[in-house]
């Protein structure tokens, strides 16, 4: 190392005469500020906090899974949680028509006469012994039902009922549209009058049940009645569709002339 | 019955003090006997106060490297800014916090070299034979103020100034300078001697005028 180089290195500090302006640090500070983070005070405390956070996440996940799995459980008399899906499936085997209503139906349309017929108010959940595989799949809405409900209707009750009604209403509407667009080649429109009367009666029943829910609040029996009435309507519409299809097929098989002037559509 | 004092050793004052200290004193103070190391670690974790301390401690020296390499205040401040940002960003990669000063200095010099490669037209330079410095028999620099030397270094022409700074003040060899600046080793040597000659002439001239 030559002497000049050696001299400058030995006096390096005196050589550094310039000073940067404050603006440089301000710029650096502005850039680094977003990444500032808090320091942990102690290693063990930091580790403990991380452990607690991780444990909380795990507990939340387990609780969530458990809650979701519980929604499929059946409600009991003590007001547990139940899903509508199971509830409807269990009521499907029991066609809840009064004897009078059944008798009013056209004979060809009542294959379910052999099934047990019970009064709506007599229906208990213990009667729901079996499930039908063909039961309509309804949205799983957890329903909390009061065992001995007070007279007033809470907003929660209506919130529970609304999706149930909407689901049934959609299915019924689909089936009605299907019937309205199916041409009928046999019988006369009067043949289906009894059916129309029956359908109107069910509408009135449903309105009465809703009114009672509004008045007395939601309870097991009323919910069952509401579901059963909706189920009845669906079954009737489905049977009507089957009956019309059978009649039309009979006409086609016998090669009877399908007179378009005599064919008609149901006005329901 | 007299209790054996040895049995109470775990309840003695130093033991309790140590235990309380371990619980209450922040971890970075427990682990770092050197406060400088502690500051560097904290700065690496994003602590603004620690970063400010490091800037306060090193900014002047680093800035002078920059201004001698670039010759202008604005460029030097830009390089200083970039170098500190890079250092704070990569601080977690520094395995030995006590080596922060040297590590930062290397970042600053690298930034200056990168700047020089783009802003100096090195192609116009030609290799010259190594000139002798034998005529510098007297140590003329000993009578000159270091402030004047610093000012004259900043006034040196582009190219030879960078070579001079790297060789004299940053202790780079001519081979390293050649590799970093993308020039030949001979060019580095000749530019160094050119810088030495110009520096001596300019300082002597100033001394003659101002006394």
Image (tube, rainbow, N blue to C red):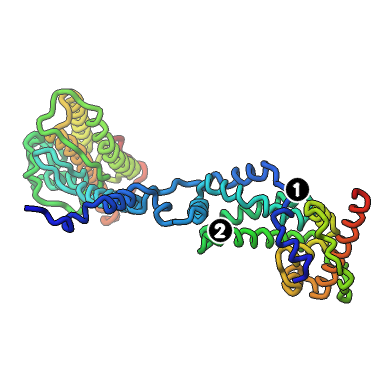
Between A218 and A123, the one lying in front of the other is A218
Disc 1 residue crowd, few under 14, some 14–19, many 20+, Cα 10 Å: few
Q: Is residue A117 left or right of residue A83?
A: left
Question: Is mark 1 in CB contact (under 8 Å) with mark 2?
Answer: no
Location of residue A64 in the rendering, given as x and y in whole percent from the top left corner: 26, 48
Between B136 and A216, the one lying in front of the other is B136
Identify the element where label 1 is drawn. Answer: helix
Q: Is residue B54 left or right of residue A173?
A: right
Location of residue A63 in the rendering, given as x and y in whole percent from the top left corner: 24, 49
Between B186 and B138, the one lying in front of the other is B138
The residue sitting at 53% across, 62% down in the picture is B94
Vertical placement of B182 versus B204: above or below? below
Residue carrying label 2: B90
Vertical placement of B121 versus A262: above or below? below
Vertical placement of A129 versus B173: above or below? above
The residue sitting at 62% across, 52% down in the picture is B58
Location of residue A186 in the rendering, given as x and y in whole percent from the top left corner: 26, 45
Q: Earlier in the sequence, mark 1 or mark 2?
A: 1
**Is residue B166 among the parts visible in the rendering?**
no
Residue B74's mark? 1
The residue sitting at 14% across, 37% down in the picture is A224
Q: Is residue A261 left or right of residue B73?
A: left
How far apart, in angstroms, are the residues tagged by discs 1 and 2? 24 Å
Between B178 and A119, the one lying in front of the other is B178
**Is residue A125 among the parts visible in the rendering?**
yes
């Amino acid at each position: 190392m030559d002497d000049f180089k050696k001299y400058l290195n030995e006096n390096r500090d005196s050589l550094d005469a310039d000073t940067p302006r404050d603006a440089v640090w301000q710029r650096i500070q502005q850039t680094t500020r977003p990444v500032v983070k808090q320091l942990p005070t102690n290693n063990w405390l930091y580790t403990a906090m991380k452990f607690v956070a991780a444990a909380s996440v795990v507990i939340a996940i387990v609780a969530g899974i458990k809650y979701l799995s519980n929604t499929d459980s059946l409600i009991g008399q003590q007001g547990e949680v139940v899903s509508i899906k199971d509830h409807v499936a269990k009521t499907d085997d029991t066609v809840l028509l009064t004897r009078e209503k059944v008798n009013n139906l056209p004979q060809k349309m009542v294959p379910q006469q052999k099934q047990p017929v019970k009064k709506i108010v007599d229906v208990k959940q213990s009667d729901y012994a079996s499930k039908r595989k063909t039961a309509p799949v309804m949205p799983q809405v957890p329903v909390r039902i009061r065992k001995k409900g007070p007279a007033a209707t809470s907003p929660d009750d209506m919130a529970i009922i609304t999706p149930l009604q909407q689901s049934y209403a959609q299915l019924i509407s689909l089936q009605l549209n299907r019937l309205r667009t199916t041409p009928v080649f046999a019988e006369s429109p009067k043949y289906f009058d009894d059916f129309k009367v029956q359908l109107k009666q069910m509408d009135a029943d449903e309105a009465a049940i809703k009114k009672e829910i509004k008045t007395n609040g939601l309870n097991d029996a009323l919910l069952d009645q509401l579901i059963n009435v909706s189920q009845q309507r669906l079954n009737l519409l489905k049977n009507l569709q089957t009956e019309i299809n059978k009649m039309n097929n009979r006409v086609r098989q016998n090669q009877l002339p399908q007179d378009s002037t005599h064919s008609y559509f149901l006005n329901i | 019955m007299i209790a054996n004092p040895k049995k109470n050793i775990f309840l003695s004052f130093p033991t309790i003090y140590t235990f309380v200290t371990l619980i209450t004193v922040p971890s970075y103070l427990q682990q770092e006997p050197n406060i400088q190391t502690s500051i560097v670690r904290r700065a690496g974790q994003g602590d603004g106060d620690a970063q400010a301390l490091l800037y306060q401690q090193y900014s002047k020296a680093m800035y002078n490297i920059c201004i001698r390499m670039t010759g202008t205040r604005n460029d030097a401040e830009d390089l200083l800014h970039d170098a500190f940002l890079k250092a704070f960003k990569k601080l977690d990669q520094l395995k030995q916090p006590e080596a922060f000063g040297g590590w930062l200095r290397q970042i600053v010099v690298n930034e200056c070299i990168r700047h020089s490669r783009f802003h100096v037209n090195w192609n116009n330079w030609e290799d010259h034979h190594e000139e002798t410095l034998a005529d510098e028999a007297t140590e003329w620099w000993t009578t000159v103020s270091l402030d004047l030397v610093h000012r004259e270094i900043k006034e040196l022409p582009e190219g030879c100034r960078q070579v001079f700074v790297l060789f004299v003040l940053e202790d780079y060899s001519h081979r390293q300078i050649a590799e970093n600046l993308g020039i030949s080793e001979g060019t580095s040597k000749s530019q160094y001697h050119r810088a030495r000659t110009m520096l001596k002439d300019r300082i002597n001239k100033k001394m003659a005028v101002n006394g």
